[in-house]
Image (cartoon, rainbow, N blue to C red):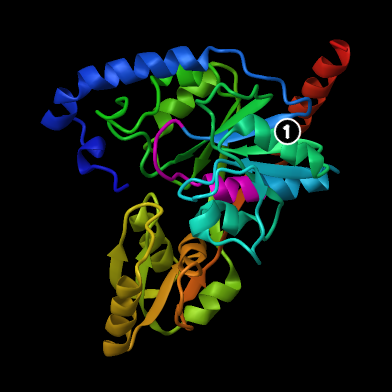
Amino acid sequence: MREPAFWYRPRSPKSHLLRPLGALYGAIAARRMTQMGVDAGIPVLCVGNYHVGGAGKTPTVLALTKLLRELGETPVVLSRGYGGRLEGPVMVDRMRHTAIDVGDEPLMMVRDVPVAVAHDRLEGVALAKSQGATLILMDDGFQNPRIMKDASLIVIDSERGLGNGKVFPAGPLRAPLKAQLARTDALVLIGDGHAADGVAAEISARDKPVLRARLKPEAASVAQLFGRQVLAFAGIGDPERFFRSLRACGVEVARTRPFADHHMFSPAEIAALVADAQREQLVLVTTEKDLARLRGNEGVPDGIVPFAVQLEFDDVPTLRRLISDHLYKARERRFSTR
């Protein structure tokens, strides 16, 4: 889905016309969020966002995976496998599965952490526990009440913020902001922008932590593109953020091609990209998530460079304390109710 431009305009007639639908959708979503979820039996940490589209959840999950392992934990990621055809429950296997099977994000994450894909999250929990998980790292699902969450970390792109602040379809919010703020345990702001400063102030006023983080490109990716002109393409929540990141690293971006989030590239589209790059002597570069989808196609040409990034938190000690405290409380609560 490509996000409508009017979601990021403060006073759009289209948004105004859709407000009644947004109010109805928001009321239902807010009511659902008050429902009591099923206890997974082990700690559940949810990485979500307030709005539809991308904000940096996948890099956040991978950064938390590294920290959790340093704490001696064995995390398993639970995902619905958005865009994949398999309902699960199934453990993602890069040797057997493609993005068509399990979605692009699980296929990307499984290189670093076991990933269980399940449309029924309860079944996914059971599968994750059978793999020896000491905790479940839930990728998305913040608004879904099916599983009780011990902590919810919400990710926002600080450059884009929450758009017009209205509920879908009038805006990008998945539920009224007030209902979502009340269930937020920490906010992760990615980047140096100020579009989410108001939300950050609300979270701070509730005595919840606001963590700053940045996407840092891997040196090998930058070196591979040094001194070369590129044709950059991406089918993610915010392709322009990817293009800006390339330029910020000194990569000479000659041309760009944005696609809708989770776009499944056809052979014809791939051929057209390759032809354009060859005609203008450009290097094709894309995100790791897009490359995960491309690998599901037959005959994907070599030479498409993935631009790898990692999320780095400004204050790792605070993040470590936050996670440790929530894990301790989660286990203490379960022990005391036995």
| In this view, 274 is above or below 165 | below
* Residue 138 left/right relative to 260: right
**Boundaries of the magenta span:** 50-63
| The magenta stretch spans residue 59 | yes
Callout 1: helix, strand or loop? helix
Q: Is residue 331 visible?
A: yes
Identify the residue shown where x is 80% and y is 45%: 131
Which amino acid, mark 1? Ile
Q: Is 241 on the left or on the right of 84, as rendered? A: left
Q: Position of residue 36 (x, y in %)?
A: 61, 13
The residue shown at (64%, 50%) is: 62
Q: Nearer the viewer, residue 149 or 83?
A: 83
Judging by the rendered image, the residue that carries numbered circle 1 is: 323
Q: Position of residue 185 (x, y in %)?
A: 61, 24
**Which quarter of the figure has residue 315?**
top right
In this orientation, which residue lies closer to the viewer: 71 or 28? 28
The correct choice, above or below, for 295 with respect to 173 in the image is below
Image quarter for residue 239?
bottom left
Point out residue 139 in the picture as x, y percentages from the top left corner.
Answer: 58, 40
Q: Is residue 289 left or right of residue 27?
A: right
Q: Is residue 73 magenta?
A: no
- Image quarter for residue 275? bottom left
